[in-house]
Amino acid sequence: MLFGVFRDEERIQKRKFCPELFAAVKKHFDSAVSRPWYEAVVEMQQPATDWRKWDVLWQLHKDNTFLDNVAEQLLDMANISEKIVDGLAKKYA
């Protein structure tokens, strides 16, 4: 499972990556990398790396701590990137 800050190439075209955004994400998620379609992307390690397995799907369905763990990571990403992305949107509006 991957999560991160997506780059909409059709809208931003050849705009350079934002090193400030990547550094902020990398500081919190040390496994973060940059890819052509992502400013920063993280491969989720917790609560599970492979969500295709039956036991993981069952946890997703029945275990609220599983969902809380995922939600916390997504919220962390949003909080880390929010001000930087807002600044980029204003800069390029």
Image: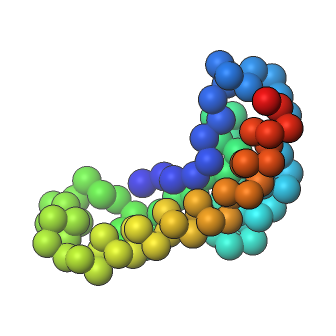
Q: Position of residue 2 (x, y in %)?
A: 48, 52
Query: Which residue is more in the foreground, 46 or 75?
Result: 75
Asked if residue 12 can be seen in this view, the reply is yes
Say above or below: 64 vs 1. Answer: below
Q: Is residue 55 left or right of residue 29?
A: left
Q: Which residue is at the far bottom? A: 65
Image quadrant occupied by the N terminus: bottom left
Q: Position of residue 54 (x, y in %)?
A: 15, 61
Query: Which residue is more in the foreground, 63 or 12?
Result: 12
Q: Is residue 85 left or right of residue 73?
A: right
Asked if residue 22 can be seen in this view, the reply is no
Identity of the residue drawn at 68% across and 58% down:
81
Query: Which residue is more in the foreground, 51 or 68?
Result: 68
Q: Position of residue 87 (x, y in %)?
A: 80, 48
Q: Which coloring applies here?
A: rainbow
Say above or below: 81 vs 93. Answer: below
Image quadrant occupied by the C terminus: top right
In which image quadrant can residue 69 be found?
bottom left
Identity of the residue drawn at 77% across and 54% down:
84
